Amino acid sequence: MKSISYHRGEVAVQEQAGTRAQAAQLAPILQTELPTPARNFLAAQPLVVVASADGQGRLWASALAGTPGFLQTPDAYTLRIAAQPVTGDVLQANLAAEAPIGATVVDFAKRRRIRLNGRARLSTEGVTVALDEVFFNCPKYIQAREWQLLPGAETPLAGPGATALTPALQTWITAADTFFLASAHARAGLDVSHRGGQPGFVRVLDAHTLQWPDYAGNGMFQTLGNLALDPRAGLLFPDFGTGHVLQLTGQAHVDWDADHAGAFPGAERLVRFQLTEVRTLLHALPLRWVFEEYSPFNPPVEPA
C-alpha cells in the first residue's frame, strides 16, 4: 500500500486554518486500496455521488443508484458501479472515454461516509473505477435518513440547461440540508465531498451566486485545498422526497475574512459559488428517504 501525501493546496489551507498537525496525524487514513470494512460498507449502500469533468473542463456531480450490491469490489483496487447515468445526465458523455472521477458514498442512517477517486470507464455493464485513493470521512453534518426503493420508478426527465437560477430553484437550494461538492486537482484527480447543515445554511445571493459557511471538520481540507489551486466546482442538490436532482457547475472561492464568517454561526470561513450552468433531472433517483433527525453537529442558521 503506497502512502499518499497532501498536495500543496491542501498544505496551504491546513497552514492557514491552523490544522497542519491534526492533518498530519490523519494522513495514514488516505489509502490506495479498499480495506475489508470499506468493501463491506460499499456492498450495503444504494447510492453513490460521482464527480466528473465535461469536454469544456467544467465539473459536475451526478448520482447513481441501485439496490445494495450494485457497488461491487472484485478486488481491493477496483470499484464497479452496476448502473447507468440517467438520460440527460452529463456523466454519460463525460465517461465516453476513460476519465478521472471522484466518488462519495454516504450511509445517511448510520452517519458514515467514504470517499474514493480514480480513473473510470463506462460500459454496458456500468462504471468501472481503477482506484487511486480511498478513505473514510468524519460523520459530522449528516442528517439521519432511512432509504426506500420505489417498486416502480418513474422515467427520468432532463430539463433544459440554464445559466441562472429560477425562483423555484432558489427555493429548492435554500430549503436544502445536504448537497455534494465536486472539485479537482491536476495531480490528485477529482473529488466529491458531502456538505450538510440546517435548512438555509446555503444562501442564494442572486440568480447566479450561492454562499455557504464552511464548518469545522477533520482539518484535512481536500476540497478547499483543491479550490485553492483550481476554482472549478460542481454542486449536486438531491431532493430526498421526490428523487429529483439539481446539478450546478461553476467556480467556487473561499472567503477567509473572519468578520464575514462571524455572520454565520459556527462558520470558520465562507465559500462563494458563481454559477455557469444549471441542470434539473426529474425522477433521477429510484429512491426516497424518510427524514429522522438533523445532525447534532449542525450549527443554527440565522435568517438571511
Image: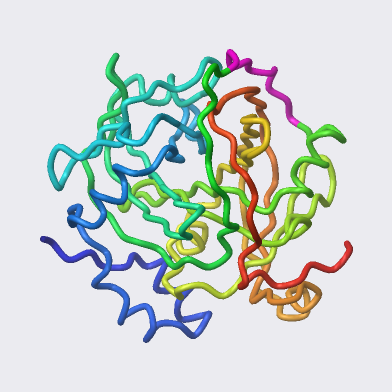
Check the picture and name the quadrant holding the N terminus.
bottom left
In this view, 273 is above or below 16? above
Q: Position of residue 73 (x, y in %)?
A: 20, 40
Task: Report the residue at 37% width, 78% height from top.
Answer: 23
- Quadrant hosting residue 138: bottom left
Horizontal side of residue 287 vs 220, given as left or right: right
Task: Report the residue at 33% width, 38% height from top.
Answer: 100
What sort of colour scheme is used for the picture?
rainbow
Q: Position of residue 72 (x, y in %)?
A: 24, 36
In this view, 85 is above or below 175? above
Horizontal side of residue 207 vs 161, given as left or right: right
Horizontal side of residue 115 vs 178, given as left or right: left
Q: Position of residue 98 (x, y in %)?
A: 28, 27
Q: Position of residue 136 (x, y in %)?
A: 34, 61
Total number of numbered discs in the rendering: 0
Task: Report the residue at 43% width, 35% height from top.
Answer: 52
Horizontal side of residue 133 vs 16, given as left or right: left
Task: Report the residue at 55% width, 28% height from top.
Answer: 285
Q: Main secondary structure of the magenta part?
A: loop
Magenta stretch in the rendered image: 154-163
Name the foreground residue: 203 vs 39: 39
Name the foreground residue: 105 vs 223: 105
Residue 30 part of the magenta-drawn span: no
In this view, 78 is above or below 115? above
Check the picture and name the quadrant holding the C terminus.
bottom right
In this view, 2 is above or below 239? below
Name the foreground residue: 272 vs 110: 110
